[in-house]
Image (cartoon, helix red, strand yellow):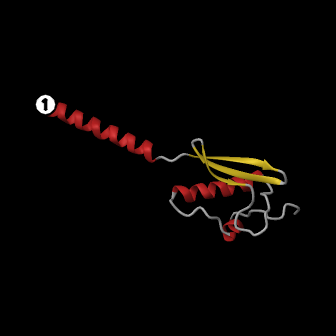
Amino acid sequence: MKNILKLFLVFGSIVLICGVVFLIKNTSTYNTRVYKVNTGYGYEISMGSKILIKQDHVPAISEQHTFCNSEDALKIANLVISKLENKENPRITTAELKTNAIALNCLN
């Protein structure tokens, strides 16, 4: 009976350790930094110390406009992170800009 209990404890410990290692390894941590650009804001997405995306302008539009405010830059950065975490293409569309009410004309 003692041998079965020891075997069960050893096996349980191994399963627990493997589970913890799996969770730690598969947990991706993306970091976002919104920063000031000359005429507005941009964002940066990194994983650890590696910068994955540096976006100085609003994506998906032909003109090179910066984000009018830090909140808009953060909304889109969080959308990109959500796509990355779901293993989707992180490209932003004009429809997503409209859905998130991203201002494209900072004068209004």
Q: Relative to the observer, which residue lies in front, 95 or 30? A: 30
11 relative position to 102: left or right: left
Position of the C terminus by quadrant:
bottom right
Farthest residue to the right: give it: 107
Residue 2 location, quadrant: top left
Q: Residue at 28% across / 35% down in the picture?
A: 13
Q: Amino acid at mark 1?
A: Asn
Residue 104 location, quadrant: bottom right
Q: Residue at 43% across / 44% down in the picture?
A: 25
> x, y (%) of residue 79?
62, 58
Q: Relative to the observer, which residue lies in front, 18 or 37? A: 37
42 relative position to 16: left or right: right
20 relative position to 69: left or right: left
> x, y (%) of residue 92?
65, 65
Position of the N terminus by quadrant:
top left
33 relative position to 41: left or right: left
Looking at the rendered structure, the secondary structure element under dot 1 is helix
Q: Residue at 56% across / 64% down in the picture?
A: 89
For disc 1, the neighbor class at 10 Å (few under 14, some 14 to 19, many from 20) is few
Farthest residue to the top: give it: 2
**Residue 19 vertical position relative to residue 76 in the rendered view, above or below:** above
Which residue does the numbered mark 1 point to in the structure image? 3
> x, y (%) of residue 4?
14, 34
Farthest residue to the left: give it: 1
**Residue 96 vertical position relative to residue 27 in the rendered view, above or below:** below
Exactly how many numbered labels are in the figure? 1
> x, y (%) of residue 69?
79, 54
**Residue 93 vertical position relative to residue 14 in the rendered view, above or below:** below
Residue 66 location, quadrant: bottom right
